[in-house]
Image (cartoon, rainbow, N blue to C red):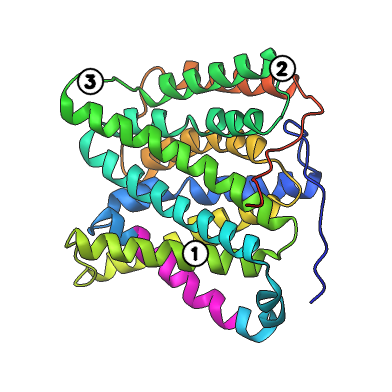
Amino acid sequence: MKRVATTAPAVLDLPPPTDLALITVGLVAVSTSGPLIAAAAAPAVAVAFWRNGFATAVLAPLVLLRHRAEVRSLTRREWRLAIVAGALLAAHFAAWTVSLRLTSVASATALVSTQPIWAALLARRSGGDLPARAWLGMAVAVVGVTVLSGADLSTSARALGGDALAVAGGAAAAGYMVAGSEVRRHVSTVSYTAICYATTAALLLGACVVGRQSLTGYSTGTWWRIVALTVGAQFLGHSLFNRVLRTTSPTVLALSLLLEVPGAALLAAVFLGQTPSSLAIPGLVVLLAGIGVVVTARSRAVEPSLPAE
């Protein structure tokens, strides 16, 4: 297939209408991730492996049948960036899921949501121009997530370790999106996503083996939840986000993902009986206000460009 390169979207450019629709679908899909993982009676990292493994099993035949020529034509830099993106996605999953066992879900959720700030820092490092108003808006949005989730940061060594892992998970997620946006300028969604998920699955499988996490023996209900994760959060979530990275900046996409938090809280309340904090509504208002501040601070900055060598 013919490969067509695209120019990088500006750091704060609003997504085109099609991307907005796909991001909305993706947000609904990834909002199911937390509740499904919480309800699955299986090690969290193993669940992350299976969702990426199942997704790879679906995409690999499609790549072999329809995208073989494109994969063969990938440059060394494109291969490297796709593999780096997969490694960062694996790091995100591993850090995030382990943090949930060490600190509160609320604190982990709030801290992993720092990813738009990490994405903006990567943009700035590569010459992107973000006005002070945008930084202020992102800080307000993250505070809104913290209030909404009811985070109560603890000073115990165990909880602080979990908090650090959650922050690392947010940074890894931002790096994954930035690397993916570089690849997506030249490579199709299917080819890039297949390479990325295969890398993620391989690394998570290694983590499960080293950590001696059970990969089988789950109940039927747990397997169905893993399938639901694959179809929803993986294909309709991450894969759609990979699709829009061609024309939407990683910074804007990371910012939009903050809306996953109220979505997950709503689903957890409906299906798991987890009553939201009394601060949920005020937190949501602050979150939306922060996003609004960023949206009104659009600039002509360029997205980060990873060095060729």
Residue under the image location 34 percent in, 50 percent down: 94
Q: With respect to residue 56, does 17 lie above or below?
A: above
Given contact means CB atoms under 8 Å apart, are the residues at marks 3 and 1 in contact? Answer: no
Distance between the alpha carbons at the discs numbered 3 and 1: 34 Å
Q: Position of residue 232 (x, y in %)?
A: 50, 59
Amino acid carrying mark 1 in the image:
Tyr
In the rendered image, residue 49 lying in the magenta stretch gets the answer yes
Residue in the picture at 29% in, 19% down? 152
Image position of 239 with respect to 100: above or below: below
Disc 3 versus disc 1: nearer the observer: 1
Q: Residue 10: x percent and y percent?
A: 78, 35
Left or right: where 38 falls relative to 132: left
Mark 2 and mark 3: Cα distance apart in space: 33 Å
Disc 2: which residue: 131
In the rendered image, residue 224 lying in the magenta stretch gets the answer no
Q: Position of residue 209 (x, y in %)?
A: 22, 66
Q: Which mark is residue 197?
A: 1
The image quarter in which residue 236 lies: bottom right
> Identity of the amino acid at label 3?
Ser
Q: Quadrant of residue 153?
A: top left
Magenta region, residue range: 48-62
**Mark nearer the N terminus (2 vs 3):** 2
Seen at 58% across and 46% down, the residue is 177
The first of marks 3 and 1 along the sequence is 3
Up/down of 13 relative to 291, above or below: below
Sequence-earlier tag: 2 or 1 = 2
Neighbours of disc 3 within 10 Å: few (<14), some (14-19), many (20+)? some
Q: Quadrant of the N terminus?
A: bottom right
The image quarter containing residue 256 is: top right
**Majority secondary structure of magenta residues:** helix
Tag 3 residue? 154
